Amino acid sequence: MDKFFEVSLPVQIALGGGYLGYLVAYVGIRKEHQQVDTVFLTVAFGIVATLAAKYLSPYLPTNVSIVVAVLAPVVAALIWRKFGRPLVRKVYRETQVSYADDDATVWTTLAADTSHEITQVSAVLKDGRELFCDNTERFAAAAFAPFMVAPDGAVTMYVTHTYRRDKTGKATATAHADTHDDYWGDNMTVIPADSIHTLDIRFRKKA
């Protein structure tokens, strides 16, 4: 870290701003990135910081131009994540260049998608129970998102119903009326990855 402060200010701006841009652009989906990915993506966003510093410094006070230069790659990262990344993949698909999304796991793809919303979640456990959230909108104001996936594969959800099937396959449902309580709040269930047999997730395109 000491060596970082020994390099010139323009290099510090490029590296610092570039790394911030990388963190913002790939938040939640960089777990499988290799060191080389981090380095070159940092350099890519660092170029934005360098260009911003070069062309804005003649018109702004030094301190202001430094702040703007560091923030520029962050803005570029937000634009890339929201519009650029999906657009590039859409072009690949429609031109039949590639149908691969290049994500390391299916969870990475799901985490990166912001054009759809999850409406229902069903988790079938290895012990035979089926945990179901019938309407995630009921928990839109809850402390945490209605469905989340941890790096270790564990999932969280608000369980509104539990199903158990007998030997004939007939399901018996138990409703959880206390999942939401006006006073106590919302009860979230954490399901370890090694307890899950199957996950069913229903998506709806955002209006």
Image (cartoon, rainbow, N blue to C red):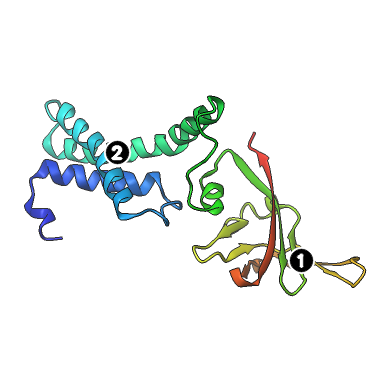
Find disc 2 in the rendering and name its residue.
73
Q: Amino acid at mark 2?
A: Pro
User: At x 8% / y 49%, what residue is drawn?
Assistant: 7
Q: Which of the pair 158/38 is nearer the observer?
A: 38
Does the image show residue 89? Answer: yes
Residue 143 higher or lower than 127, as above or below: above
In front of the other: label 1 or label 2? 1
Mark earlier in primary sequence (1, 2): 2
Per the image, label 1 sits on a secondary structure element best described as strand
User: At x 63% / y 66%, what residue is drawn?
Assistant: 188
Residue 89 higher or lower than 183, as above or below: above
Q: Position of residue 205 (x, y in %)?
A: 65, 37
Q: In this rendering, would 76 be left or right of 109?
A: left
Neighbourhood count class around disc 2 (C-alpha, 10 Å): few under 14, some 14–19, many 20 upward: many
Q: Which of the pair 139/150 is nearer the observer?
A: 150
Q: What is the C-alpha distance between the residues marked 1 and 2?
A: 45 Å
Find disc 1 in the rendering and name its residue.
130
User: At x 49% / y 63%, what residue is drawn?
Assistant: 151
Does the image show residue 143? Answer: no
